[in-house]
Image (spheres, rainbow, N blue to C red):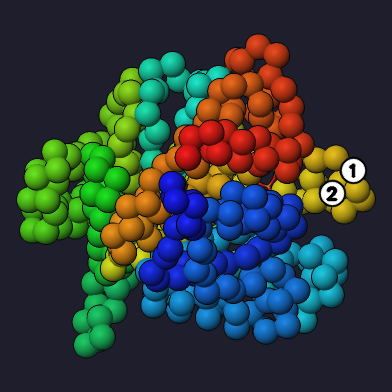
Amino acid sequence: MDKTGTKIAMKTPLVEMDGDEMTRVIWRMIKEDLLLPYIDLRTEYYDLGLPHRDETDDQVTADSAEAAKKYGVAVKCATITPNDARVKEYGLKKMYKSPNGTIRAALDGTVFRAPILVKGIEPYVRSWKKPITLARHAYGDIYRNTELRVPGPGRAELVFTGADGHEVRQPVFDFAEAGVIQGMHNRDSSIESFARACFRYAISVREDLWFSTKDTISKIYDGRFRDVFQSLYEREYREEMDRIGTKYFYTLIDDAVARVIRSEGGFVWALKNYDGDVMSDMMAAAFGSLAMMTSILVSPDGVYEYEAAHGTVQRHYYKYQKGEPTSTNSVATIYAWTGALRKRGELDAIPELIRFADALDAAVLETIESGRMTGDLASISTIPDAKVLGTEEFILAVRDTLERKL
Ligand code: NAP
Ligand code: MG
């Protein structure tokens, strides 16, 4: 609401992807307690909750991805990725694929994970003052490999047969005993999409972009990644980055790891698939809590989808269903909403919407800094006598702080 008491108007709808379990409960509370009183919220709603995915044979997930492409900004609740237990629990027609995987494939997107920093929840690395956002390439390498157990002595070769029948053949190793081999690949177009998403994202948050591989050892494979990033930077992004005072920086992964630990943070770190898989879990733990990590999917043509990095918090949901008290952290889900609203505000030139998103983010941090937080944070907080609030109690405390700010 602005000073005259009218709600903030929106122009283009957000694509709203609802989800499952405890995060679905939180989703409704955030809308009712923190958004609807202040914003004339316009969303195109897609119910990605597992029962509705089953009813629609998962068509709803594909439809929601198409809507994200159409409107450009989406906000997503955590969703269940079905396994055997879930197929039984929900009586599913089949074991559907991960919605995040489906949406990522449809958008050809890259996932950026960024921690939310707040006083009282200190990163394990003392020098980190600002968030480090991690971008993981989500295609190929060992995740699409072909492996072979070598049974005994013999020759392993790498063979490529061109569409014209031309053959290139290279020895891998002459085995005198048993062992293992693996073949993996990546595609120029996928590497380029990844690089574009990274440059776009870094520019949108006005931070430096770091990229690191092991190109001293893997001269052709990792070298290709390095070259694609470098040439895109020179051709398309350098000018803009110079103008906003940011830069692209390539270094060997060993060197990057050492620099990251000594840094203050405040940059985007792009990594190949495996490096990103490992490093993103390390960074989430090092920043303090998975419940304080946001996740943003960015497509190479600039579609943004915001969500929390954590799952549906199943264990809390079962307690909630039994009517027991819960203390589930809603911070990353609130930040998913504010991220999406802020982006919508930027694209549609609605400064009040941007101001609202900033105020709500600040209200979340101030509430925690005042010593009121959910149980997961209280257990790691350096704030003395932190008070543990229930799930909705925390959201209402944020609302109180927000009221005082607006
Ligand atoms: P999870 O939902 O992330 O929860 C794992 C544990 O971390 C929780 O049991 C809880 O610990 C703690 N935790 C996570 N988020 C929290 C929060 N907001 N507040 C307080 N504590 C939090 O992972 P999961 O239990 O392995 O997976 C549950 C479901 O989520 C699965 O069906 C999976 O498919 C799905 N999932 C979805 C996404 C997504 O949509 N992006 C991502 C990951 C997983 P305590 O129980 O000790 O309190
Ligand atoms: Mg992992």
SS category of the residue bearing label 1: loop
Q: Is mark 1 within 8 Å of ligand 1?
A: no
Q: Residue at horizontal 56%, vertical 23%?
A: 369
Q: Under tag 2, what secondary structure?
A: helix
Q: Nearer the viewer, residue 394 or 217?
A: 394
Seen as rendered, the residue at the extreme right is 322
Q: Is residue 156 left or right of residue 58?
A: left
Amino acid of disc 2:
Tyr
Q: Tell me if residue 119 comes above or below residue 54 in the rendering.
A: above
Q: Which mark is residue 399?
A: none
Give percent across and percent down for residue 260.
34, 28
Pointer 1 residue: 324
Q: Height in image: 208 above or below 127?
A: below
> Where is mark 2, residue-wise?
320
Q: Residue at x 38, y 61 (%)?
A: 344
Residues 116 and 371: in front is 371
Q: Is residue 333 visible?
A: no
The residue under the point 23% across, 72% down is 168
Of the pair 158 and 288, the residue shown nearer to us: 288
Q: Position of residue 133 (x, y in %)?
A: 39, 41
- Where residue 173 sits: x, y (%)? 36, 54
Is 146 situated left or right of 251 in this image? right
Mark 1 surroundings: few (<14), some (14-19) or many (≥20) residues within 10 A: few
Indicate the amino acid at tag 1.
Glu
Task: Count up the numbered dots.
Answer: 2
Residue depicted at x 53% and y 28%: 366
Cα–Cα gap, marks 1 and 2: 5 Å
Q: Are marks 1 and 2 in contact (CB under 8 Å)?
A: yes
User: What percent of the width, then of the height, locates residue 336?
Assistant: 51, 51
User: Can you tell which quarter of the image residue 87 is in?
Assistant: bottom right
Q: Residue furthest top?
A: 384
